[in-house]
Image (spheres, rainbow, N blue to C red):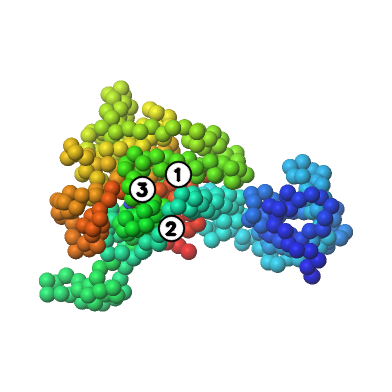
Amino acid sequence: MENTVVRTKVKDLLKSKPGIDVLAKGWVRTKRGNKGVAFIALNDGSTINNIQLVVDKTRIGDDVLSKVTTGACIRVEGRLVESVGSGQAVEIQASAIEVYGECDPVRYPLQKKDTSFEYLRSVAHLRMRTNTFGAVLRIRNQMAFAIHEYFHSKGFVYLHTPLITESDCEGAGQMFQVTTLDIDKPLPRNKKGSVDYSKDFFGKQTSLTVSGQLEGELGATALGEIYTFGPTFRAENSNTPRHLAEFWMIEPEMAFYDISDNMDLAEDFIKHLVKYALEHCADDIQFLNDKYDPELVERLRGVADTEFVRLEYTDGIRILEEAVSSGVKFEYPVYWGVDLQSEHERYLVEKHFRRPVILTGYPKEIKAFYMKQDENGKTVRAMDVLFPKIGEIIGGSERESSLKKLEDRINELGMSRKNLEWYIDTRRFGSCPHSGFGLGFERLLLFVTGMQNIRDVIPFPRTPKNAEF
Ligand code: 4AD
Ligand code: MG
């Protein structure tokens, strides 16, 4: 079959004026009809909406039409006409169909009755062809673009920090080791009996990064304002709907920002992204709203227009303790010094304030070594942004800029300085006040799409005991 016209994407066809010859290509979603006419819904991934093909069976025979089944890939030529049926403005009156790839209706996994998210995760190589995952992944794409655009417009430098590293930024020991040593054979040992990493690929022990922040600070103290946007890895055995072993993080880091500038940026950033989604992903968000989450659009608008609460950790604990005394039941205990669980965060956000909360002034014991210590010696200038449905969506802080205080904290925690001297140099040479934060990209997407499980907002989720595809 020859190209008489150029292929138009379904998204553009649906916006075109009728009365032109068109060429469309895509995958069949459904086919129905009667003796004389067949109706085919065609989707090419460019939009949540399908284009309807109307096929006169006297023009296109059963030899072709019998191969046009759900999942088959076809090429169709025809005339774009005003649709008589409701539901769409235009449709294609097909004059010729070529089947690029047939799709056995018996074996095609997406034909099964079971379309639970759990089942779809087991066929993640095909689930992108469903309406839901098409919508989620188009939103994911728009959000990635919006993030770059936001920082670019503010003059931030996009810094590429390494994925393989020698340091554990968060100090939580949740690193995946990277090695070329053959672990099936006896490992090289030093005199003390421990593994001799000088024989390993990098000549030292290395891991996949949990965060680009430490290298980001090197960038910020040279270029002023930077951000990273890349994959990060955590070997935490958390089988929850909010944790992945491989997730994407956006980490801005800014010289001369104090904690309050940092909070302003975080709030503006996230509101901008939510507004961008409402504006640029309206069809996909409406689809998810109507199918799964009738309050989604309302929730997004709410966050875009609301001022976030700014609350000290100590005051947050007091509110939670009062809730407990008035009969609210939490699974985990509440007291000053405790690391808040997501049930506590969600109580503050969803029940008490009914809007996003930025919690600051955390006890230093439950936060990372690099955070700026308060005068009281007990708290640090940390900030977590807590969101409805999600809990923590952003974690950040003002950084400790005093060489002495940073060194004291590293020693207090018994951390190895050997791998950190390069980082400490930022405080040794021209130290400056600075701040930053990390936004979990998939947590943001959970919020924007209303999906319930983080495994369903990334194409190929990595979680404990699962690294398929
Ligand atoms: O709070 P976290 O651990 O902070 C950092 O890594 C800092 N170095 C960030 C910085 O200040 N530059 O992680 C930041 C965010 C969390 O708020 C959460 O949204 C997300 O990353 N996150 C995860 N998302 C999915 N799966 C996991 N296992 C996550 N762990 C953290
Ligand atoms: Mg955190």
Residue 84: x percent and y percent?
82, 44
- In what element is the residue under mark 1? helix
Q: Are marks 3 and 2 in contact (CB under 8 Å)?
A: no
* C-alpha distance separating marks 2 and 1: 16 Å
Please say if 413 is above or below 337.
below
- Residue at position x 31%, y 58% from top? 218
Label 2 amino acid? Answer: Tyr
Label at residue 437: 3
CA–CA distance in space, label 3 to label 1: 11 Å
Nearer to me, 156 or 57: 156
Name the residue type under label 3: Phe
Res 65 visible: no
Find the residue positioned furthest to the left. 192
Q: Distance of mark 3 from mark 2, alpha carbons? A: 15 Å
Residue in front for this viewpoint, 107 or 138: 138
Snapshot quadrant of residue 260: top left
Relative to 59, residue 240 above or below: above
Q: Comparing marks 3 and 2, which lies closer to the viewer?
A: 2
Question: Mark 3 falls on what kind of element?
Answer: strand
| Relative to 293, 224 lies left or right | left
Identified by mark 1, the residue type is Phe
Q: Quadrant of residue 190?
A: bottom left
Mark 3 and mark 2 lie on one chain; the one further toward the N terminus is 2
Q: Which residue appears at 41% of the width and 34% of the height?
A: 308
**Callout 2 touching callout 1 (CB < 8 Å):** no
**Residue 9's spot in the image, x, y percent?**
69, 57
Give the residue at mark 1.
269
To which residue does mark 2 refer? 158
Residue, x 73% and y 53% (percent of image)? Answer: 13
Where is residue 269 drawn, in percent x and y?
45, 44
